[in-house]
Amino acid sequence: ILLLWRSRPLALASASLCPPPAHPIHQTTLSAMTKLETILMGSAVFLLTGFLATFLSFMSPAMNKDRGLTNLLICTATVCCWLLWLITFMMQMNPLIAPKME
């Protein structure tokens, strides 16, 4: 029974439900815009996270003594995490599969 079940072809989506393939020019423009929007959205998330962490450090009574150092560390950590995310995202935009030897 298992062999018969696996031998049948899977019909998950019919051809009438699938949209026609887009023109390659439109795909390039759309993907470039999507990448830009993703970079801007990710940057906004890191910026808001940094502002939120700085705001919470001002609300904490335990941070009164070293407030300047705490804010410096929060800003440094936020910028470093953002750069790590940005570099990783940009490396995946145009991956280098194998170098071409000339």
Image: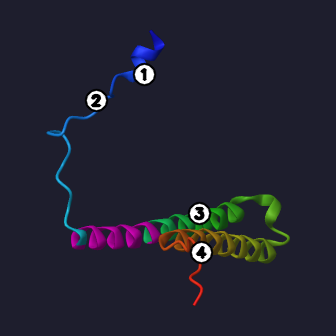
Q: Residue at x 78, y 59 (%)?
A: 61
User: Is residue 31 on the magenta stretch?
Assistant: yes
Disc 4 versus disc 2: nearer the observer: 2
Three-letter amino acid code at the position of disc 1: Arg
Report the side of 61 relative to 99 (left or right). right
Three-letter amino acid code at the position of disc 2: Ala
According to the picture, the residue beneath numbered tag 3 turns out to be 49
The spot of residue 66 in percent (x, y) is: 84, 72
Q: Residue at x 77, y 77 (%)?
A: 68
Outermost residue, right direction?
65
Three-letter amino acid code at the position of disc 4: Ile
Secondary structure, mark 3, is helix
- Precedes in sequence: disc 2 or disc 1: 1
Q: Nearer the viewer, residue 42 or 24?
A: 24
Which label sits on residue 11?
2
Q: Could you tell me how far apart the alpha carbons at marks 1 and 3 are, in whole angstroms?
A: 49 Å
Q: Residues within 10 Å of mark 1 (few under 14, many from 20)?
A: few
According to the picture, the residue beneath numbered tag 4 turns out to be 87
Q: Could you tell me how far apart the alpha carbons at marks 2 and 1 are, in whole angstroms?
A: 12 Å
- Precedes in sequence: disc 1 or disc 3: 1
Outermost residue, top direction?
1
Res 52 quadrant in image = bottom right
Three-letter amino acid code at the position of disc 3: Thr
Magenta stretch bounds: 25-39
How many numbered discs sit on the rendered protein? Answer: 4
Q: Residues within 10 Å of mark 3 (few under 14, many from 20)?
A: some
Q: Nearer the viewer, residue 67 or 92?
A: 92
Which label sits on residue 6?
1
- Precedes in sequence: disc 3 or disc 2: 2
- Pick the quarter of the image with the C terminus: bottom right
